Amino acid sequence: TNNGKSVESYVRGWLPKPSNVPYVVEYSADFTVPTDFGSPAAILITNLRPKEFHLLEIILHGFVEGPVFFPANTWIHSRNDNPQSRIIFKNQAYLPSQTPPGIKDLRLED
């Protein structure tokens, strides 16, 4: 957004990590985030695969305050069907007046 910062990354390959939960497949991506980035508040997901998939959650590790959770529980459509990215917000509620400036535009868009 015009007010926020962004970092882009991709799921490398499409090879799942083993999961202890039946019917759940885990994938990972590596992000390099500048030290002055702050805590992420939203993630934009673009599905480059030809079919939709169901996303349960995203967990970002490596931050001083601990992991950042992004509950999703939503279908992510293929970019072939809809070029718009899906916006997933972190597990943090804000009153409209307290929404961080970096995600205000994303909240309005969502």
Image: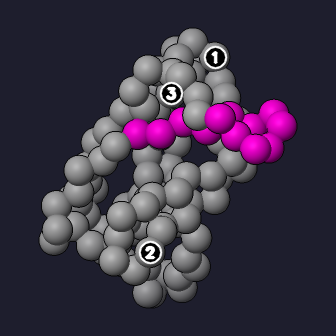
Q: CA distance from mark 1 to mark 2?
A: 33 Å
For mark 2, give the secondary structure.
loop
Name the quadrant containing residue 74: top right
Label 3's element?
loop
Q: Mark 3: which amino acid?
A: Asn
Q: Give amino acid for label 2.
A: Gly
Highlighted range, magenta:
18-29
Q: Nearer the viewer, residue 20 or 51?
A: 20
The residue at which mark 3 appears reads as 47
Give whichever of discs 1 and 2 has the lower sequence position: 1
Residue at position x 50%, y 50% from top?
Answer: 87
| Secondary structure at numbered mark 1 | loop
Q: Most prominent secondary structure in the magenta stretch?
A: loop
Say if residue 39 shows up in the picture.
yes
Task: In this rendered view, identify the residue nearer to me: 108 or 20.
Answer: 20
The residue indicated by pointer 2 is: 66
Residue 51 tag number: 1
The image position of residue 48, as x and y in percent, is: 47, 21
Taking the image as shown, residue 53 lies to the left or right of residue 40, namely right
Q: Earlier in the sequence, mark 2 or mark 3?
A: 3
Q: CA distance from mark 3 to mark 1?
A: 8 Å
Query: Could you give the CA–CA distance between mark 2 and mark 3, rounded to whole angstroms?
Result: 27 Å
Picture layout, residue 90 above or below residue 49: below
Disc 2: CA contacts within 10 A as few (<14), some (14-19) or many (>=20): few
Q: Are marks 2 and 3 in contact (CB under 8 Å)?
A: no
- The spot of residue 72 in percent (x, y) is 64, 52
Is residue 2 a member of the stretch shown in magenta? no
Q: Can residue 77 be seen at all in this image of the molecule? A: no
- Dots 3 and 1: beta carbons under 8 Å? no
